[in-house]
Amino acid sequence: MATPSDPNAEPALGGPDADPALASPAAQATGLRGPNAATERRVAYLLVVATVTALALAGVYVAGGQPQAEGALLLVSLGSIGAALVLWAKRLLPEGEVTDERGSLPSDEEELEAVEEAIGAGEVFFTQRRRLLGLLTAAGGALGLAALFPIRSLGPDPGRSLETTAWEPGDRLVDEEGRPIGVGTLAVGGVLTVFPEGKQQAGDSQVMLVRVEERLLRPRRGREDWSPQGYVAYSKICTHVGCPVGLYQATTHELLCPCHQSTFDVLDGARPRFGPATRSLPQLPLAVDADGFLRARDDFDEPVGPGYWKRG
Ligand code: FES
């Protein structure tokens, strides 16, 4: 039988569960020994559970996802890591202040043996804590990996699709029934929601068509011929957060967004006059064809909708 002074003996620290831990199958399975072996095994099991559930979470997500299962797995994984850290902090870390008297007393043989023994026990301590740190890293890594997968849910890169709409040069303007809009469709003061012909389902291409007295218009540089016979066309998607601009006040020549009351000056390129919107509604350049129908000269000259990607 090994004695405390036997240099080949396994270090055996005193403690409530030292001996059972050394002898138990669990100790042999986990390799965790010493006075805190039972607690360390619990921490190790919790971290293994956290790792396995985090990997299972990633697997469920990759397999198509199931919100309840994902929530339960995330709960178990985070809960296990939390419980392991609490156990570790409460039971395995030293508590209170430790002080020692200074002195330069010579060591006798017995003390040297005691130091040797303590160093041996320390090796077990650090080896076991390293193992736990490894498990903690594995659990954190698995959870981090699982957290990366939802990035796929952001969907494909929109590319330049947010900068263009369905309008193409020459598209006729039609109402929601698909009837083409002619120069006589609206009287001065009239307003109508119009779409590109054949593409009425394109949600980003809805346009507020307004007819005003042509002499009142104050077109911006380069837009002088965009409004034939007083027809002006602006994107119906509010540049604040994207509500439909659905109201027109003919007396003040203002388009109104009902969501947060932004108003846009129809005579001045739909410049915002009031409310939280800071960007003008994009204008669609118009022309009249030989048959008297309104057509788009081109797409909008800037992205429609909220302008967070291009302020101005
Ligand atoms: Fe139009 Fe806010 S969405 S004012």
Image: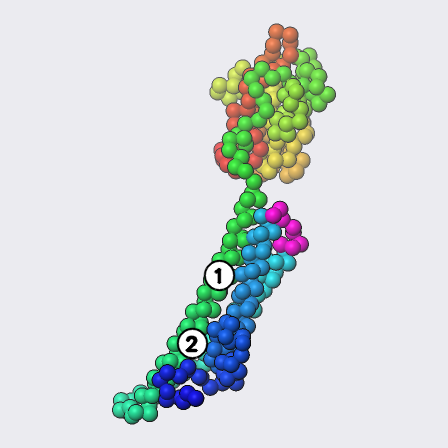
| Magenta residue check for 278 | no
Give the residue at x 47% y 76%: 93
Q: Quadrant of the N terminus?
A: bottom left
Is disc 2 placed on a helix, strand or loop?
A: helix
Q: Quadrant of residue 196?
A: top right
Along the viewing direction, whichever of 12 and 235 lies nearer the viewer: 12
Q: Quadrant of residue 286?
A: top right
Q: Is residue 127 visible?
A: yes
Task: Indicate the position of residue 51 as horizontal and vertical percent values.
Answer: 54, 61
Would residue 179 be found to the left or right of residue 285 on screen?
right
Residue marked by disc 2: 125
Task: Indicate the position of residue 109 as horizontal and vertical percent values.
Answer: 30, 92
Region of the chain picked out in magenta, as a range = 63-70
Residue marked by disc 1: 138
Give, as a three-letter code, the residue at label 2. Answer: Phe
Q: Earlier in the sequence, mark 1 or mark 2?
A: 2
